Amino acid sequence: MPDTISIKDLVIGYVSKNYTKRVSGVINASIKSGELTCLLGANGAGKSTLLKTLSAFLPKLDGEIFIRGKEISQFSNKELSRVIGVVLTDRSELRDLTVTELVSMGRSPYTGFWGRLNDDDKKIVEQSISLVKIEDLAPRMVHTLSDGERQKAMIAKALAQETPVIYLDEPTAFLDFPSKVEIMQLLLRLTREADKTIFLSTHDLEMALQLADKIWLMSKKSGITIGAPDDLASGGHLGDFFKSTGFIFDENTGSFRIRNPFRSPQKQEGFNKRCNPLSL
């Protein structure tokens, strides 16, 4: 599969009048077409800053970001809106708007000043709703949806934008466990069925390890480590990355275990064998 995104000597951070804050070391990486890539890291590691920089919401401090061979600074805003779709974690209230109308907003890069949909636009909206399997939600008002339903509607909106790349910032935040699984499986399916390049930040570690094609481990200390989940697990990278007094990564089971100082080692081992629903 070809590289959709190529990152060369990238440095991310913030610039103010008085100083420049550098958030990361030098980043060199690529993301291929049709892959689901998950960005993992502790709060404050720079995940949101990286996503905003890759989306051109923040200027990069140094380096280059190529999308389909073209440097991101060479895109106009209109061109970029046809290349990158972004789904943010936003619980703001949207009233007096149906799901169909929300998804239709994804056509704005193509509909011109007045935002009128032609027959082709309407067909793309319908296809986007169908691909996410939310046809039953189409006539519903957005503010009546659950968090999981609303997240699906936002993903359908990104699909209607017809971009080859979709970035998502914590798409499973605020969701219950079944909804988290459903959203992650949906995103994986979209990489295969719609050939989307999907890059997302998440705190759902074990789910990402099971479903992602590639994992980016991001930390202030060691920068970014990239690899397939199995390779990162077998190479000891996950164990090193998630060293904590509170939990450890068990390479034998491919899962995380919470340390319980009040349970005997024998009972803890038996509990781990019985309760490991998310092992790799």
Image (cartoon, rainbow, N blue to C red):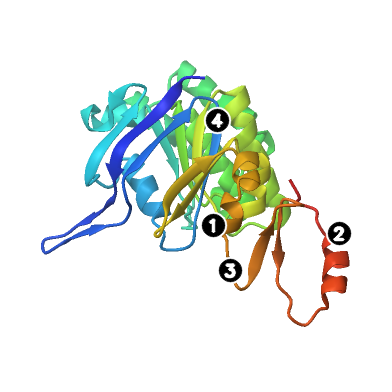
User: How many neighbours does mark 4 have within 10 angstroms: few (below 14), some (14-19), or many (20 or more)?
Assistant: many
From the image, tell me which residue sits under label 4. Answer: 35
Residue reaching furthest to the bottom:
262
Proximity of marks 4 and 2: CB atoms separated by less than 8 Å: no
> Which badge, 1 or 4, is on the more N-terminal residue?
4
- Work out whether 224 lies above or below 247: above
Of circles 4 and 3, the one toward us is 3
SS at badge 1: helix
Task: Report, in whole angstroms, how far the alpha carbon at label 2 lies from the one at label 3.
Answer: 21 Å
Circle 1: residue type = Phe
Task: Identify which residue is drawn at 58% across, 48% down.
Answer: 150
Proximity of marks 1 and 3: CB atoms separated by less than 8 Å: no
Find residue 204 and report its horizontal and vertical position in percent. 61, 54
Task: Identify which residue is drawn at 45% across, 26% down.
Answer: 164
From the image, tell me which residue sits under label 2. Answer: 273
From the image, tell me which residue sits under label 3. Answer: 244
Please tell me the numbered disc located at residue 241: 1
Task: Identify which residue is drawn at 37% across, 22% down.
Answer: 68
